[in-house]
Amino acid sequence: MAKMNLQEKLAVLSDAAKYDASCASSGTTRRNSAGGKGLGSTEGSGICHAYTPDGRCISLLKILMTNFCIYDCAYCINRVSSQVQRARFTVEEVVHLTTEFYRRNYIEGLFLSSGIIKSPDDTMADMVRIARELREVHHFRGYIHLKTIPDAAPELIEQAGLLADRLSMNMELPTDAGLRTYAPEKNAEEIRRAMGRVHERKLAARDQTHSGRRGAKFAPAGQSTQLIVGADGANDATILQSSTRLYSSYKLKRVYYSAFSPIPDSTAALPLIKPPLVREHRLYQADWLMRFYGYEATEIASATTGGMLDLTVDPKLAWALANRQVFPVDVNRAGKEMLLRVPGFGTKSVARILSARRNGALGYGDLTRIGALVNKAKPFITTRDWSPGSMTDAENLRARFAPKPEQLSLL
Amino acid sequence: MIYAPRLPRLGVFDVWRDAARALASNDVAADSVNWAMEEACDTLFGQGAALPAARAMTVPKEFIPLAKLVCASRATGAHDLLYRVLLRCRNTPHLLNNRADPQVQQLTALAKHVRRDMHKMKAFVRFREVTPQGSNRRQFLSWFEPDHRIEELIAGFFVRRFADMDWVIVTPEVTTRFDCGTLSHEALASDRMALSDDTEDLWRTYYANTFNPARLKIKAMQSEMPKKYWKNLPEADLIPDMIAQAEARVLQMQQTAPTVPPLRAARILGRLPARPEQARGQKPD
């Protein structure tokens, strides 16, 4: 086979990496290179430098170091049994692409992942070398996200955490049984143990040393994982339960949900489906409710049908429709927790309501100016000049919010 | 008496603040002030009356960052609205926290548009390399068309990020230069520049391949990357074909029968250490 040039390798290794949903570049330490040495900065919020027609943002150069892999995960384009074209970047090539893309303001940094070659340790060591070259030789101060390989030696994960902003390990399937079936070489227990070690190492980095100094920052933007939705039979309640466990036990920054998406050269073990994009969206909404709105996974599950989230209305509205006895809420008296449960009120609207109502009782028009979605909220609230009357308990309330039926496309 | 402060294209916030302080500290009503940019100078009011001497006054601390943003706005009446809110802030110290107030809501909406414009400039400026032979610093050039007058507000971001290279960002009205560590702005009318460099081919390759044709969401893309930016983005002319071919690519993936694993697959899997606790191919519980 003829030797591939850089452009050909980039085509193969970015195509192979795109099934990872994460592209976050926010929430790390603030750094810059204003002193004239080094390249890059991070300033809190991430930046999306482009969007592709799939609606996903491009913030990081998301590539695999290599798509050669010795594992055989059924959902994965890079599994050993796939006939997909293989390629491998050198350390210099990844460094070149990252710094040259960065200088042209195409990206915020690098998200480096890899197939497993030879052994987990060999693969992890090569990825750490790339991160080290960027940080120590090129003084790169942009964002680095490294995929960590659960079975890799702790020393390598230690080095990865000191060089990278974020570490991630993908669970991929929401249940251990699903993982055994479709990713037989992966081990759920091993992944959780590795997440636990990263979490403990992060905590240790926060402690002061005996001299009173803080230790070096370890993965300052935290760790994340991804769950594939719709490949195995796990329902939404099970998936949200898995997420709760990951958030609470390992303090993950994010759990990403990725609708199982057709891949070239699929396996007979896992037939291709139309990616369940609406379901994925509802899971993200439910995830948000758990992290920012004070909902428990069990509460969200209580408003599902057979453990599956309602696809026509969002999970917050579904919960409100199933729990109408607690509504309407008085916007001028209710506490923050209750205001956060009103459909149409986001965290920002709630903060503005709490601040604005000190200046006097709020009316319907005030809520519009504040930025709340009043049309959605109105059956569930009372204000100075608004009361929903019988609307809250009306039988056709759900129909008000459900979208009109439309013709489905073939795919 | 009518006052008509004139605001320059560069340093607009400083001039607005000095004039507003002189007027507000002397209780000049908003209806007696006609704010305008220098270039739009009309003859109706001319320069207006000379500004009175400023007296001491204080403003809520949230007002200053808000004012810096609103001063950059091109929206009609932005500077006037800012002055009206400043006058009201003197008697209502917590006015800015009341988002239900119509003027505060308008003002924060103006600031939000400017902030979004700044964010999009951080995202969509594309540098092209123009380093001459023999130069010891690399040089980059960009053309960008912001909606508002944000060049001075945004320059710090590029300085903090790209201090080891020289760069120039040209907009229709202002040229920002960063040369050997020194930043400068010049109010200079410029025409659109069509720029490109070699690395763009790699970037376009990346853009095309990171796209997943099975997840077409064109509206989501356009709400974040509106078409007005496309003409200056090297990757954007790929979009129409990517969209047009998406459905056929997915169909092909679904219709292609699973292939036979390559010979090496069995060999490699056979070499992996067995995991006794998990039998291969077991059905989910």
Image: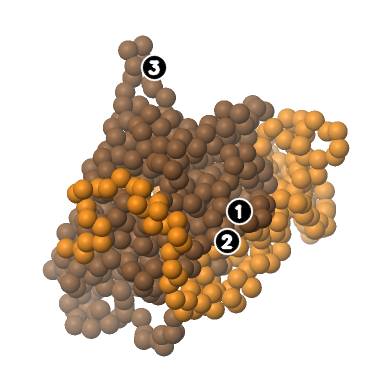
Chain colours: A brown, B orange
User: Against A90, is B247 above or below?
Assistant: below
| Residue A293: % across, % down | 27, 54
Instruction: Kindly report the distance in space between the C-alpha atoms of the residues bearing marks 1 and 3.
Output: 42 Å
Determine whether the residue tagged by mark 1 lies in a helix, strand or loop. helix
Q: Quadrant of the C terminus of chain A?
A: bottom left
Say which of B247 and A344 sits in front: B247
Do tag 1 and tag 2 residues touch (Cβ < 8 Å)?
Answer: yes
**The label number, if any, that marks residue A10 in the structure image:** 1
Say which of B44 and A136 sits in front: A136
Say which of A253 and B83 sits in front: A253
The residue indicated by pointer 3 is A213
User: Against A156, is A186 above or below?
Assistant: below
The residue indicated by pointer 2 is B209
Determine whether the residue tagged by mark 3 lies in a helix, strand or loop. loop
Determine whether the residue tagged by mark 2 lies in a helix, strand or loop. helix
Q: Is residue A281 left or right of residue A91?
A: left
Q: Amino acid at mark 3?
A: Arg
Q: Amino acid at mark 2?
A: Asn
User: Against A66, is B204 above or below?
Assistant: below
Do tag 2 and tag 3 residues touch (Cβ < 8 Å)?
Answer: no
Closer mark to the observer between disc 1 and disc 3: 1
Closer mark to the observer between disc 1 and disc 2: 1
Label 2 marks a residue whose chain is B
Disc 2 and disc 3 on one polypeptide chain: no
| Residue B113: % across, % down | 57, 57
Q: Is residue B22 left or right of residue B250?
A: right
Label 3 marks a residue whose chain is A
> Which residue sits at x=68%, y=67%?
B237
The mark total stands at: 3
Q: Amino acid at mark 1?
A: Leu
Instruction: Kindly report the distance in space between the C-alpha atoms of the residues bearing marks 1 and 2.
Output: 8 Å
